[in-house]
Image (tube, helix red, strand yellow):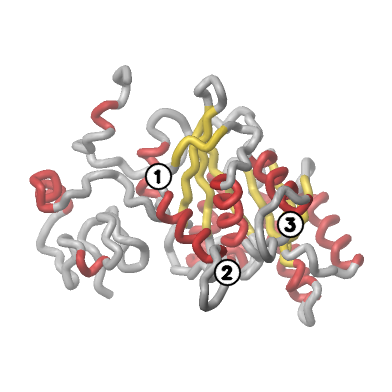
Amino acid sequence: MQSCPRSFCFAPEATCKNGEADYRECPFWRDGAEDESDDALDDHAYAGESANVLPWSGNTMGTADVEFVANKRRPRLIGLVGPHNAGKTTLLAMVYLLLRRGHFPAAGRFAGSYSLGGWEQLSSYFEWKADTGPEYPPHTAATDGRRPGLLHLSFRDDNGMGGDTLWTDSPGEWFRKWATYRDDPAAAGARWTSEHSDVFLLFADSAALAGERRGSACSNLELLVERLGERLNGRKVSLVWTKSDIEVAEPIRQRVETACARCFPELEVFRVRTPQKSLPNTPLIREFVRLIDWVLKPEEYRGEQLVLRVCAPRDPLLAFRGRAA
């Protein structure tokens, strides 16, 4: 398979690190070329062959990008965990739309993002289109052996204090495989999420749990609950019932919530669904805001550090680290 020769770029499986909409237009792209080392390619970049020497492209970030965000303080990592089609990506789009419309969380005001392109791409599906109207974001594709996509948001309070957050965007297939077999090679992204996240959002798909295969869906979710419970180590979990306008039979609902309460001592439960027309200040929207406030509630971050790759030492922005503004 053709790939970019730079070790910190994952095109074509992910977006071009150099910021090109079409990775084939990137000057570094080669048809399987191996003749140029990373150092040589970086020399070309700093010599002017590429105008983009920033450590981000504005799209979804990867673990190789995290050190730039964690330069001053460990970011708060929010792990979205759940089965396929449970609404994880849709919730991310709603988070950004609400922030864009001024629904600021209790943690502070929106203070920027290194992945605005990624957020805008997700939220664009909810915007009205003359031919199709609004849509749901597409399913997040699974690629074996990769880590989750990361979306960045920064918040500040009135005193200028705050922090950075990273939100995982992962395919449900990873969690299904991880729940069944913890060491499945195709579940590396799920294991990374379970290891590093500071707080978890566990998704329960009301449509699946009310459908014809609700028994199987419930059993699979119970397996995922037990697997996450094994790795919890005191971290907080919320159970997010998505598509909450669909009625789930009370025995199924009790079965899911009992399994969660057994594994997660401080469980919070939210019921959300996507509005069909607009984003007014309704109880539906207030539940989303309550969820965001719970996720971003100020508290002590865990002490351990993310396992990161080293950024390029000649990064012009990191050269200002430690200096007064």
Quarter of the image with the C terminus is top left
Q: In the rendered image of this protein, does residue 168 appear above or below residue 172?
A: above
Residue 48 falls left or right of residue 15: left
User: How far apart in space, not on screen, are marks 1 and 2 (Cα)?
Assistant: 26 Å
Q: How many residues crowd mark 1 within 10 Å: few (<14), some (14–19), many (20+)?
A: many
Residue 131 coordinates in the image, percent (x, y): 52, 78
Q: How many residues crowd mark 2 within 10 Å: few (<14), some (14–19), many (20+)?
A: some
- Does residue 115 show up? yes
Q: Which mark is residue 80?
A: none
Check disc 3 and report its element: helix, strand or loop.
Answer: loop
Q: Which is in the foreground here, disc 1 or disc 2? A: 2
Residue 323 coordinates in the image, percent (x, y): 29, 19
Earlier residue among tags 1 and 3: 1
Amino acid type for the residue under numbered disc 3: Val
**What residue sits right under mark 2 in the picture?**
134
Earlier residue among tags 1 and 2: 1
Q: Which mark is residue 272?
A: 3
Q: Check if mark 1's residue and mark 3's residue have beta carbons within 8 Å.
A: no
Amino acid type for the residue under numbered disc 1: Tyr
Residue drawn at 57 percent across, 55 percent down: 92
**What residue sits right under mark 1 in the picture?**
114
User: How far apart in space, not on screen, are marks 1 and 3 (Cα)?
Assistant: 27 Å
Q: Residue furthest right?
A: 250
Residue drawn at 44 percent across, 43 percent down: 113
Q: Nearer the viewer, residue 116 or 298?
A: 116
